[in-house]
Image (spheres, helix red, strand yellow):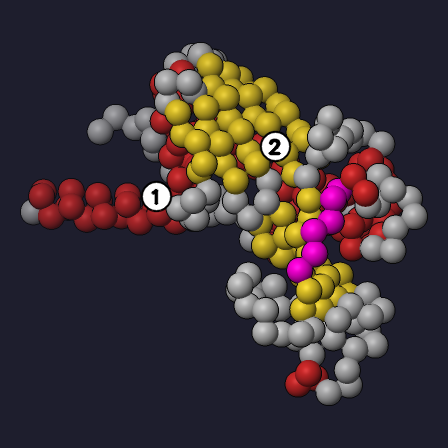
Amino acid sequence: MRKTLRLLAFIACLCCGTTAAQAQVMKAADLQKYAKERYGDKWLEAAKNLAEELTLDKNESLTYQQVIKAEGKTKQQIYVTLNYWATATFKDKQAITLNDKDAGCIIISSTIPNIAEHMGTISKYSVSITPVIRIDIKEGRVRVTYTVQNYDILRDISGGWFGPDDKKNRTFGDSKRKAEDKTNEMLYDENWEIAKHYPFVEKDAQKRTCAKALVMTHAYSNAVLDKIEEALKNGIVGNDDADW
């Protein structure tokens, strides 16, 4: 009977752990809510305000860096926790591009699809980003560097306000289209350098798209930093350090 109870408790623990790990990934709707709560829903104004406190690095990339304290924890303990966090959060097997325990360095590069959308007069734009997240680990502290250089754009020339009247011919910026699929003549892949668009450049034909993209990119960086700090303080499933 005791063995049965222990087995059931163990299975329950695994299920709870799986749920908590999956919850580490912030959905697009949750991210937008997160952004609106912090910066408001007036994207142009929010982006302009952010630009006053943001600076581009020497490569004209948007880079954030933060040192997070983990007092009382060894380099090895921190590495195990954040390695677990990274593998639980980023499901793409290719996302973790460097995982060096001895050097205390984890580098993650994973595409966040459809982080922002905007319907313009002629086209609809779906914005994705591929941030590079570098985690450097030392005794009792972690340094996180988050960098984004470009917006990856899927432009749908049938999805604007003045698109075709026949909805069957409108694709509505289908951001789920496979990258190698070039059969839809309405869809165009574009790459926009952040430094060459609003709010870093005032006169921009894609001002509204880039305003929302910047705010959402900034919000995602904060969400990542928050989750890393939470993992360091409380573990991934809440009972990582439990006596078993």
For label 2, the SS is strand
Q: Position of residue 5 (x, y in %)?
A: 15, 46
- Determine which of the numbered discs, if any, sits on residue 146 in the image: 2
Position of residue 175 relative to residue 241, above or below, is: below
**Magenta residue check for 49:** no
Q: Position of residue 244 (x, y in %)?
A: 22, 29
> Decide: marks 1, 2 in contact (CB < 8 A)?
no
Q: Position of residue 136 (x, y in %)?
A: 50, 21
Report the magenta stretch's main SS. strand
Quarter where residue 64 is shown: top right
Position of residue 240 relative to residue 218, above or below, is: above
Instruction: Identify the residue shown where x is 73% and y is 27%.
Output: 57
Q: CA distance from mark 1 to mark 2?
A: 27 Å
| Amino acid tagged 1 | Gly
The residues colored magenta run: 189-194
Position of residue 28 relative to residue 175, above or below, is: above
Instruction: Identify the residue shown where x is 66% and y is 52%.
Output: 152
From the viewer's perspective, tell me whether residue 178 is left or right of residue 5.
right
Q: Is residue 195 visible?
A: yes
What is the number of callouts on the image? 2
Instruction: Identify the residue shown where x is 69% and y is 73%.
Output: 186
| Amino acid tagged 2 | Tyr
Name the residue tied to disc 1: 17
User: Which tag, 1 or 2, sits closer to the chain's start?
Assistant: 1
Quarter where residue 85 is shown: top left
For label 1, the SS is helix
- What crowding class fits label 1: few (fewer than 14 Cα within 10 Å), some (14-19), or many (20 or more)? some
**Magenta residue check for 190:** yes
Please name which of the two marks, 1 or 2, marks the residue nearer to the observer: 2
Position of residue 81 relative to residue 44, above or below, is: above
Q: Is residue 21 visible?
A: no
Instruction: Identify the residue shown where x is 55% and y is 68%.
Output: 181
